[in-house]
Image (cartoon, rainbow, N blue to C red):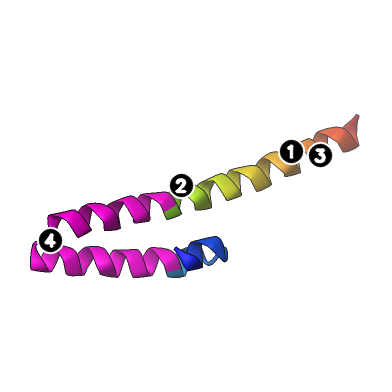
C-alpha cells in the first residue's frame, strides 16, 4: 500500500498481482481475497485521481471561457 500512497500505482498493482498469483498457487483463499481487495483499492484510487485531474482541467477551461 506504500506505493499506492506515493502515487506509484503501477508498482503497487504489480506487487498486488504478484501476491495474488502466489496466494492462488498455494491455495490460500483468505490472502487471495486480501490481494484482490488491495488490487481493487489501488485501481480505484488511481482512477479517482485521474478523474479528479480531468475534472479540474474541465473547470479551468470553462472558467477561462467565461
Say which of 40 and 2 sits in front: 2
Residue located farthest toward the left when viewing the structure as drawn: 27
Q: CA distance from mark 2 to mark 1?
A: 21 Å
Nearer the observer: mark 2 or 1; the answer is 2
- Residue that mark 4 sits on: 28
What's the magenta region? Answer: 12-41
Q: Secondary structure at mark 3?
A: helix
The quarter of the picture where the N terminus appears is bottom left
Pinpoint residue 57: horizontal percent, then vertical percent.
74, 44
Corner quadrant of residue 6: bottom right
* Mark 1: few/some/many CA within 10 Å (<14, 14-19, 20+): few
Q: Is residue 10 left or right of residue 29?
A: right
Q: Are marks 2 and 4 in contact (CB under 8 Å)?
A: no
Q: Quadrant of the C terminus?
A: top right
Front label number (2 vs 4): 4
The secondary element bearing badge 1 is classed as helix
Q: Earlier in the sequence, mark 4 or mark 1?
A: 4
Q: Nearer the viewer, mark 4 or mark 3?
A: 4
SS under mark 2: helix
Q: State whether the magenta stretch is mostly helix, strand or loop.
A: helix
- The residue at which mark 3 appears reads as 61
Please give the name of the residue rendered at 50% of the width and 62% of the height, measured from the top-left corner: 4
Q: Which mark is residue 58?
A: 1
Amino acid at each position: 500500500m506504500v506505493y499506492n500512497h506515493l502515487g506509484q500505482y503501477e508498482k503497487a498493482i504489480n506487487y498486488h498481482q504478484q501476491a495474488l498469483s502466489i496466494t492462488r498457487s498455494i491455495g490460500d483463499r483468505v490472502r487471495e481475497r486480501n490481494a484482490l481487495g488491495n488490487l481493487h483499492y489501488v485501481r480505484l484510487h488511481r482512477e479517482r485521481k485521474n478523474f479528479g485531474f480531468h475534472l479540474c482541467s474541465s473547470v479551468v477551461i470553462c472558467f477561462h471561457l467565461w
